[in-house]
Amino acid sequence: MTAQPEHELRLLRLERTLAALLRHGALVASAWITLGMILALLGTAAPQFATPLAEACLAVGIVLLIALPVLRVALTAAIFLFERDYVFAAVSSAVLIIILSGLL
């Protein structure tokens, strides 16, 4: 009878870890995009300094937003491997390979 609550605790931990990754990743990406937008607005006064930096900040934020789902699938595959759930690890790894091949 103790196996079921222990399994449920592991699933809850997995869900919390994935939710934290997405939440914090989205916040960090949003902060980069916000910084880039602010620098772009300030760049009208000094475009030689602010414009390249604004573009770089915006690019970092967009790349982070694109990378978040890939990181989630990679983390899911790693967690399933760690828990020795090889079927779901294989499925997650296959999804990760498909996503990464689409990026190439």
Image: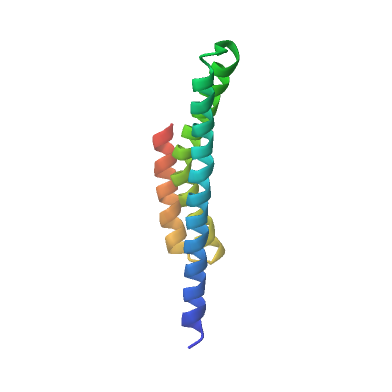
Question: Split into 4 quadrants, where in the image is the C terminus?
Answer: top left
When the figure is inspected, residue 101 is found, relative to residue 69, above or below; the finding is above
> Residue at the spot x=44%, y=56% of the render?
90
Count of marks placed on residues: 0
Question: Residue 72, how many percent across, how many down?
Answer: 47, 50
Q: Residue 66 occupies which quadrant of the picture?
A: top left
Q: How has the structure been colored for display?
A: rainbow
Q: Report the front residue among 61 and 68.
A: 61
Which x, y percent locates residue 71?
50, 47
Residue 45 in view of the camera: yes
**Percent coordinates x, y for residue 9 in the rendering:** 51, 74
On screen, 28 above or below 78? above
Residue at 53%, 34% (x, y): give it: 32
Picture layout, residue 90 above or below residue 54 = below
Give whichever of 7, 37 is nearer the camera.
37
Task: List the single residue furthest toward the bottom.
Answer: 1
At 52% from the left edge and 78% from the top edge, which residue is drawn?
A: 6
At 47% from the left and 58% from the top, the residue drawn is: 89
Between residues 87 and 2, which one lies in front from this camera angle? 2
Residue 74 in view of the camera? no
Locate residue 40, reporting x and y percent: 50, 21
